[in-house]
Amino acid sequence: MTVSPKSTGQGREASGFSLGSADARDKLTGLASIAQARQTIEGWRANAAKRDAQFTMHAMLVSLQRIDTINVAFGETAGDGALIEVARRITHFADDEFAASGWLAARVSGGTFLIASLERCSRERWQWLAEALADAIALPVSNVVGEGTVRLWPRVTLMRSVDLDTDALLDRMASAFAEKFDGNARRIAWVSDDAPIHNRSSTRLEADLIAALDRDEIEIVFQPQFSVAGERLIGAEALARWQHPELGLVGASTLFTIAERADHVAQLSRHISEKALRLACKWPQPMRLSLNITPTDLSSGNFARDFLAMIEEAGCKTNNITVEITEQLLLTDLVQTTETLEAIKAKGVSLALDDFGAGFCNFRYLKVLPLDYIKLDGTMIENIENDERDLSVFRAIVAMAKALELKIVAEGVESEEQRRIIAREKCDFYQGFLKCEPLRPERFMDLIGK
């Protein structure tokens, strides 16, 4: 997804443009093109004018250092792969952090990306979000043309725009790069003369997270999942949220970025799984619970034993649990990973490959891992109702999954037409804002009761 209308109603429909034309999107990454970004922002501005409201928007311009070096060292295919992965990380970050507001993500040119949001937030929160996104982008990227990984160094300019037209906004943010970063090692800068904010240090934020774990402040929400045939509620994916007292809502991807810096990924992952399992055992009827696990989890030789013991202690049945592995994560020891997953599958746990199609697809995972499901990333669903090429790619992946006897979960279904197409193409399950947004535990209980 490149532009989101969620909650505010000021995205796709309200801005008056359509994603129907492939020319509206960047051909490499699938993000919005710069022309589409202009049209979207002008649509937001027009909506504000209709309400006699001041138009205010926060923006980030992200420039990737070292992308030219990767192109020279490994070839343009490797560079393109890195750009696709960065686009995926930006999209997932925005989905997590801006779920309650309109946003867009666009590729401006080369290794430069624009992220804009209608979220009302403080300067401190916007800078913190930029730091978190920069951390996510700076994580290793798998080299699609060979062994090993590559790293990119993002630099970000920030701006709060008040009634500034799109071209002026981009010009000011782009021109600030030379001024703000020349000979300077910092990676975040504001495009204004305002006094610098006293942003929260990474060390303090890591300490906040550890304290939040101790105080059980990490919340669980459930993204309902439905059968395509019959529209029956069949379960939910557990998602984590953290309401930071000063920075506001922190999504799952950023949570894990902070946890990685603090060397607390395993603790955070276990905390989320334990809490979700305890909640699921209170559901009035058996439903499938999907839990995300990390490469850190899988690298532990005791993971299978500990995970099964966690399910038993919570009082859940293993045949109601699905473990999700994100396709884009780097599984360093595929042999050990396969053995671990086979051990939990033997006890009844189902296995899903998440975010399939978000970047360069790792088809080796389909060959080696003992999977039951693939979850098609929302980018695979977006625009299938308007673009024949997108629909053809979707059909090919569905056919491959069926040939491998894998069940298919479609993520990010946002329109009735998309739901009709995935039903026609024989997908098994779906989730997305068309049917239901992520729910707090008590609201999900109400949904089950209905």
Image (cartoon, rainbow, N blue to C red):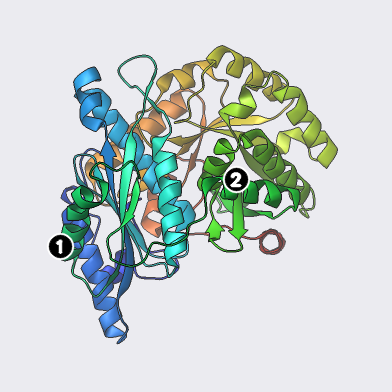
The residue furthest bottom is: 52
User: Is there any visible trace of residue 94 in the rendered image?
Assistant: no
- Where residue 148 appears, as percent x and y from the top left, is 39, 17
Q: In the rendered view, would you say 432 is above or below 75?
A: below
Q: For the point 26% across and 31% down, which residue is it? A: 66
Q: For the point 19% across and 60% down, which residue is it? A: 172
State the residue position of label 2: 206
Q: In the rendered view, would you say 43 is above or below 188?
A: below
User: Is there any visible trace of residue 8 in the rendered image?
Assistant: yes
Q: In whole angstroms, how far apart are the C-alphas of marks 1 and 2?
A: 37 Å
State the residue position of label 1: 167
- Where residue 48 appears, as percent x and y from the top left, is 30, 79
- Mark 2 crowdedness (10 Å alpha carbons): few <14, some 14-19, many ≥20: many
Amino acid type, callout 2: Glu
For this rendering, which residue is in front, 302 or 225?
A: 302
For this rendering, which residue is in front, 258 or 335?
A: 258
Q: Which mark is residue 17?
A: none
- In front: mark 1 or mark 2? 2
- Chain-order first, disc 1 or disc 2: 1
Amino acid type, callout 1: Asp
Q: For the point 55% across and 60% down, which residue is it? A: 249
- Mark 1 crowdedness (10 Å alpha carbons): few <14, some 14-19, many ≥20: few
On screen, residue 54 versus residue 256, left or right, reads: left
Kind of element beneath mark 2? helix
Kind of element beneath mark 1? helix
- Where residue 117 appears, as percent x and y from the top left, is 36, 62
